[in-house]
């Protein structure tokens, strides 16, 4: 799961259409009718449906609170929810992506959970970047149930064949090892990097920029991309050189999405790859991957002046203002959010369920010490590397109301520099200019 975004025109048109639909939605339940019905209305995208149903059944049995469970496909979820918000449809609790928080909070579609100390107490257990990703303008809007980050993987067997004893620790070492692997005829393009303009792109770019010691945005909210010899410039220059000069990354990377990149790496075509951390379960599953058993995670390579930092993302349970406005519904909604994002009984049951069944990440560092979690992960990867890298995960610094509009400009600019159609400096200047202009107009 990742970010979804719209361009400025399509987003405005969509919201107008949603507003018109809301005005005509006389058949939808009013908040009063919803309150009388008793059951909470929970909306999620169509993921881990059986696990959610099982956990909901346990919640109902434990609390006596009934929950109406509704789903929509991920690709349509954001649009579906906005239509429902505008129409004031009966919704109490829903899944939220960190990418949507500023837009949904400013629109009044989310209620802060600060009035519920029983939820805020979990912040002491949670990863800092998770709590930061749920916080907007000083208010917290939910509890996380899932998080993960961009990871650096390598094919241990390919490195061994090339006479390489250990994975790279810096991006310069990635280059040198890639050239050695390429010259040995083991891979035409040893480094796999997905650069297609899709929702995953900002995660790939953020991992590159953060590990090169850079930022997209400074502490005051202005663009930091165009700084001479800054982390963003060093990151983009490394990618452009890897494609044009050293030819260790395919120029087709600008058309390669995350899923196709996963398939290419899993087919044994590359020695290195940036991929979502949870993908290692698939890559080391003999039923799904030709290179099962060969994939290892290494710490993110560091650029000059950088560190092994990476980008993290998370998803959380939020509450609507409709639910928050009714004391009883609000209390019940908080219990439901806690059941999924906090402890159910004595442990973080739902996050453990997602991890053990699907390999999904979690935002609770103490789970790394859980014997069941350790045994599960040991079947396909090293949990110590998983944990060490997660400690260095940072939230995306570009999430804003104008993110979708800017993301289109930024993605095009980076692709242009990667293919040599513009200079690195010009590409970043264009992206920075678009960010500052959108920020000024917001």
Image (cartoon, rainbow, N blue to C red):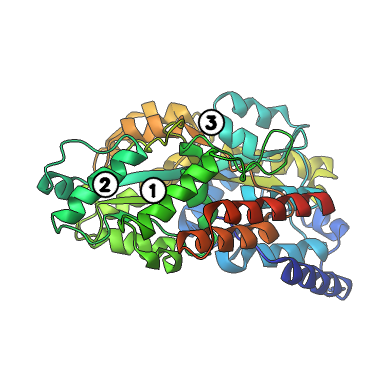
Can you give x and y, in whole percent of width and height, for residue 217 in the image?
65, 41
Q: Residue 236, percent across and down?
A: 48, 50
Q: Is residue 425 left or right of residue 369?
A: right
In this orientation, which residue lies closer to the viewer: 351 or 336? Answer: 351
Q: Return the disc, 2 or 3, that comes first in the chain's sequence.
A: 3
Percent position (x, y) of residue 407?
Answer: 63, 58
Residue 278 tag number: 1
Determine crowd level at label 3: few under 14, some 14-19, many 20+ residues with C-alpha closer than 10 A.
many
Pointers 1 and 2 in contact (C-beta within 8 Å): no
Residue 106 percent coordinates (x, y): 81, 49
Q: Residue at x 46, y 37 (%)?
A: 211
**C-alpha gap between disc 1 and disc 2:** 14 Å
165 vs 129, left or right, is left
Looking at the image, which is closer to me, 439 or 144?
439
Q: Is residue 147 visible?
A: no
Q: Which residue is mark 2?
A: 154
Q: Is residue 312 above or below residue 416?
A: above
Residue at image position (80%, 58%) is 34
Cα separation between marks 3 and 1: 17 Å
Snapshot quadrant of residue 83: bottom right
Question: Which of marks 2 and 1 precedes in the sequence?
Answer: 2
Horizontal side, residue 234 vs residue 330: left or right: left
> Which residue matches tag 3?
127
């Amino acid at each position: 799961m990742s970010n979804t975004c719209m361009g400025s025109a399509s987003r405005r048109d969509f919201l107008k259409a949603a507003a018109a639909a809301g005005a005509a939605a006389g058949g939808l339940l009013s908040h009063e009718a919803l309150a009388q019905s008793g059951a909470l209305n929970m909306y999620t995208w169509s993921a881990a449906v059986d696990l959610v149903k099982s956990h909901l059944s346990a919640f109902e049995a434990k609390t006596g609170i009934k929950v109406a469970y509704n789903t929509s496909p991920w690709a349509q979820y954001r649009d579906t929810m906005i239509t429902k918000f505008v129409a004031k449809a009966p919704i109490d609790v829903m899944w939220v992506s960190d990418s949507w928080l500023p837009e949904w909070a400013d629109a009044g579609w989310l209620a802060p959970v600060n009035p519920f100390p029983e939820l805020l107490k979990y912040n002491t257990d949670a990863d800092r970047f998770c709590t930061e990703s749920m916080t907007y303008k000083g208010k917290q809007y939910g509890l996380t149930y899932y998080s993960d980050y961009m990871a650096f993987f390598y094919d241990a067997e390919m490195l061994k064949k090339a006479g390489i004893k250990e994975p790279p620790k810096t991006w310069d070492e990635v280059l040198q090892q890639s050239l050695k692997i390429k010259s040995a005829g083991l891979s035409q393009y040893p480094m796999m990097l997905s650069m297609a303009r899709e929702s995953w792109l900002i995660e790939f770019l953020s991992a590159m920029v953060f590990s090169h010691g850079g930022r997209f945005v400074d502490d005051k909210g202005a663009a930091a991309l165009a700084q001479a010899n800054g982390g963003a410039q060093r990151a983009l220059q490394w990618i452009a050189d890897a494609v044009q000069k050293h030819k260790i990354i395919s120029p087709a990377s600008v058309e390669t999405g995350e899923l196709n990149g996963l398939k290419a790496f899993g087919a044994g075509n590359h020695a290195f790859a940036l991929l979502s951390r949870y993908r290692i379960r698939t890559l080391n599953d003999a039923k799904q991957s030709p290179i099962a058993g060969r994939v290892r995670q290494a710490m993110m390579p560091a650029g000059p002046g950088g560190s092994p930092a990476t980008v993290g993302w998370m998803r959380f349970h939020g509450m609507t203002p409709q639910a928050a406005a009714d004391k009883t519904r609000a209390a019940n909604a908080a219990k439901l959010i806690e059941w999924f994002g906090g402890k159910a009984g004595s442990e973080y049951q739902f996050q453990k369920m997602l991890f053990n069944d699907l390999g999904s990440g979690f935002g609770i560092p103490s789970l790394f010490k859980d014997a069941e979690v350790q045994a599960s992960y040991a079947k396909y990867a090293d949990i110590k590397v998983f944990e060490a890298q997660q400690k260095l995960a940072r939230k995306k610094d570009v999430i804003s109301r104008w993110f979708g509009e800017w993301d289109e400009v930024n993605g095009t600019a980076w692709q242009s520099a990667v293919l040599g159609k513009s200079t690195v400096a010009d590409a970043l200047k264009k992206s920075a200019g678009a960010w500052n202009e959108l920020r000024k107009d917001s």
